[in-house]
């Protein structure tokens, strides 16, 4: 009868250590963070760190998976409300507000975005973990695609661009804006560029005529 409780305690302990590791990685950077630093942040010894995560590589990949999960949660939380979608212009507003809501998280915690970029490239450099980056972007695409699909269905409108292609366009655009924002931290310019991205997404969704 006590096994589930032990499992829950172990899972909670692992989650606490992982959260501490993410804080250290975001603050110090992936390249500069040692296992000693990660253990100190989590207030455990290095043996305990190895017990829960094995090698440093294993911990870094676990951190990337956790960041993937958090990102998908943020995106899913931006899902527009059905009542708003049914109003005139509701779909346009929903697209704009959903993308803007995600961007607010980027501005709020840019160091986490930088750390996630570092972890993605870290995984890509290792053939045995490259699959994780495919899963990362496949997961993001699936979440955004599902949001578009549901929103257009509720609004009773047809999307001029296939949902999967539109989702990939959004993700590619956001990724590019994140990298530019990380390089100069120019919030005003980033928001202007974000408005251009939103306008492009709406145009693709509505099937704006080619020039």
Image: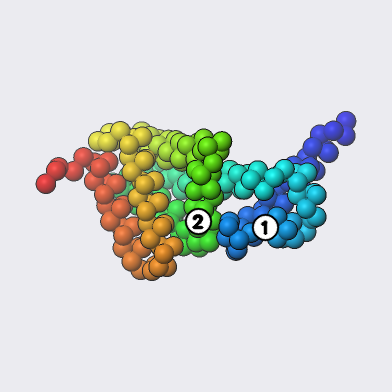
In this rendering, position of residue 16 left or right of residue 4: left
Say above or below: 81 vs 135. Answer: below
Pick the front one: 80 or 144: 144
**Earlier residue among tags 2 and 1:** 1
The x, y position of residue 178, in whole percent, is 41, 57
- Which label belongs to residue 113? 2
- Res 72 visible: no
Say above or below: 182 vs 135. Answer: below
Q: Which residue is mark 1?
A: 34
Pick the front one: 5 or 65: 65
Q: Can you name the residue that lies furthest to the right here?
A: 1
Q: Quick one: label 1, few (<14), some, or many (20+) residues within 10 Å?
A: some
The x, y position of residue 2, in whole percent, is 88, 34
Quarter location, residue 115: bottom right
In this rendering, position of residue 127 left or right of residue 16: left
The x, y position of residue 89, in whole percent, is 28, 48
Q: What kind of element bears circle 1?
A: loop
- Which label belongs to residue 15? none
- From mark 2 to mark 1, how far is it between C-alphas? 20 Å
In this rendering, position of residue 19 left or right of residue 196: right
Pick the front one: 76 or 59: 59
Q: What residue is drawn where x is 32% and y is 36%?
A: 165
Q: What residue is drawn where x is 62% and y is 48%?
A: 60
Q: Kindly report which numbered mark, 2 or 1, lies closer to the viewer in this rendering.
A: 1
Say above or below: 9 vs 185. Answer: above
Quarter location, residue 191: bottom left
Q: What residue is drawn where x is 40% and y is 68%?
A: 184
């Amino acid at each position: 009868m006590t096994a589930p409780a032990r499992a829950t305690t172990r899972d909670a302990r692992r989650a606490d250590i992982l959260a501490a590791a993410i804080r250290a990685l975001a603050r110090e950077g992936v390249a500069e963070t040692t296992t000693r630093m990660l253990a100190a942040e989590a207030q455990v010894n290095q043996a305990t760190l190895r017990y829960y995560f094995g090698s440093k590589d294993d911990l870094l990949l676990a951190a990337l998976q956790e960041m993937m999960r958090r990102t998908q949660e943020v995106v899913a939380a931006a899902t527009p409300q059905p009542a708003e979608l049914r109003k005139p212009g509701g779909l346009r507003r929903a697209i704009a507000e959903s993308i803007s809501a995600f961007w607010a998280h980027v501005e709020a915690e840019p160091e986490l975005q930088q750390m996630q970029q570092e972890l993605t490239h870290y995984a890509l450099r290792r053939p045995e973990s490259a699959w994780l980056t495919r899963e990362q972007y496949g997961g993001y695409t699936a979440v955004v695609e599902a949001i578009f699909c549901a929103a257009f269905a509720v609004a009773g409108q047809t999307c001029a661009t296939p949902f999967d292609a539109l989702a990939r366009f959004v993700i590619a655009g956001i990724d590019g804006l994140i990298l530019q924002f990380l390089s100069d931290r120019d919030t005003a310019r980033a928001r202007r560029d974000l408005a251009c991205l939103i306008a492009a997404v709406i145009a693709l969704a509505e099937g704006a005529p080619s020039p």
